[in-house]
Amino acid sequence: MAVFDVSKFLLEEEVFSSSATKSPEKQREALLKFLVIIAIAISLESLVFIFDAGSKDITTLIYPTFLLIAAILLVVGLGVYQKLTRDEVT
């Protein structure tokens, strides 16, 4: 499902739209949308791996945990990016 979402996004952004006429705001939205799709896919995969490792062999639980931590750091990084690049409306 995540592969379908990523391929649909790339098709919409790279094939159907003209990147030369995009404003920086539209490019920022596209980047955020792409990274959110990736973060969701990583989070779901890590949760599946955690439950699989927890039921089979508890010693392999560290690798999916690192994957989940990476997904969390990606979401936090996205939040920081949005905070730093937002337009100040006064």
Image: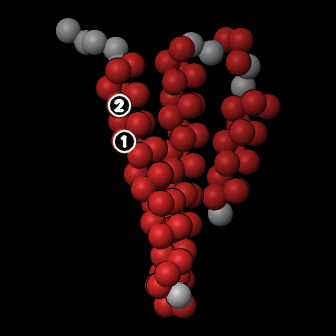
Q: Secondary structure at mark 2?
A: helix
In the depicted structure, whether residue 22 falls above or below residue 28 = above
Q: What is the crowding at mark 1: few (fewer than 14 residues within 10 Å), some, or many (at least 20)?
A: few
Give the image quarter of residue 76: top left
Does residue 89 appear left or right of residue 66 in this picture?
left
- Residue 72 seen: yes
Mark 1 in CB contact with mark 2 (< 8 angstroms) = yes
For image coordinates 45% across by 66% down, the residue present is 65
Q: Which residue is mark 1?
A: 76
| Residue type, numbered disc 2 | Val
Q: In the image as oriented, which residue stretches furthest toward the left?
A: 90
Q: Which mark is residue 7?
A: none
Q: Which mark is residue 80?
A: 2
Q: Secondary structure at mark 1?
A: helix
Q: Position of residue 67 (x, y in %)?
A: 51, 59
Q: Position of residue 20 (x, y in %)?
A: 71, 12
Q: Position of residue 34 (x, y in %)?
A: 58, 40
In the depicted structure, whether residue 70 falls above or below residue 68 = above
Q: Nearer the viewer, residue 69 or 82?
A: 69
